[in-house]
Amino acid sequence: MIEPGEVTNLLLEMKRGNNDAEGQLIPLVYGELRRIARIQLRRERSNESLQPTALVNEAYIRLTGNRNLDWQNRSHFFAVSAKIMRRILVDHARNNNAQKRGEGWDAVSLNEGILPAPSRTPEILALDHALDRLATIDERQAKIIELRFFGGMNEEETGQALGISARTVKRDWRIARAWLFKELSPSASQ
């Protein structure tokens, strides 16, 4: 059982340069990162055999590799995790799209295991572009979508990460989902 504040304390210790803190952090956050990755991959892939482990490992490397991040708390850590997983999936979807056009034939990715299914590449890129557009209209709503959709957070966790009430999250979640639905509908691209 994780003690309240334990993840936050370890993140602060890592920021101070305590290398042992990272070794203690991994077992505490790994299960939650895998849960987030499973949610992501369930949405992105239909019958592919991708394991969440590859996505978690790539995200964790990026998370802990940036010593300049000013970790606030556990919620902040998982919010940044969700954003990084989104970036990984989008980057690989773009890479996959480029390969379809014949670019990069000589390049070999060490992380081929986390490539999204080719059939879902357009949807991933469309969602990413739509979220970027939403962020210019209402940044908080875009963050809520990112945390709930990509981070697998519930309303309370999302509210805590953003410093708002669960009720506000629920309201903005409904509005943002409706906006995305309209934005991503086939009639919107005509």
Image: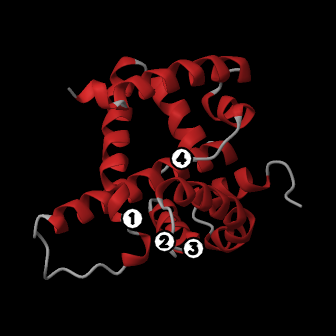
Q: Earlier in the sequence, mark 3 or mark 1?
A: 3
Secondary element under disc 2, as helix, strand or loop, is loop
Distance from Cα at disc 3 to Cα at disc 4: 16 Å
Left or right, residue 15 beside residue 128: right
> Label 3's element?
helix
Q: Residue at x 35, y 54 (%)?
A: 90
Contact? badges 2 and 3 (CB < 8 Å): no
Kindly report which numbered mark, 2 or 3, lies closer to the viewer in this rendering.
2
- Nearest the eye: 147 or 24: 147
Q: Is residue 16 visible?
A: no
Q: Which residue is mark 2?
A: 48
Q: Amino acid at mark 3?
A: Thr
Q: Nearer the viewer, mark 1 or mark 4?
A: 1
Q: Is residue 175 left or right of residue 74?
A: left
Q: Which of pointers 3 and 4 lies earlier in the amino acid sequence?
A: 3
Residue placed at 24% from the left, 63% from the top? Answer: 95
Q: Amino acid at mark 2?
A: Glu
Q: Which residue is mark 3?
A: 53
Residue at the far left: name it: 102
Q: Label 2 near label 1: C-beta < 8 Å?
A: yes
Tell me residue 8's x, y (percent). Answer: 71, 50
Q: Is residue 174 above or below residue 155?
A: above
**Mark 2 or mark 3: whose residue is earlier in sequence:** 2
Residue 42 on image: x %, y %: 56, 58
Q: SS of the residue at dot 1?
A: loop
Res. 150 mark:
4
Name which of mark 1 and mark 2 comes first in the sequence: 2
Give the labeled residue for mark 1: 117
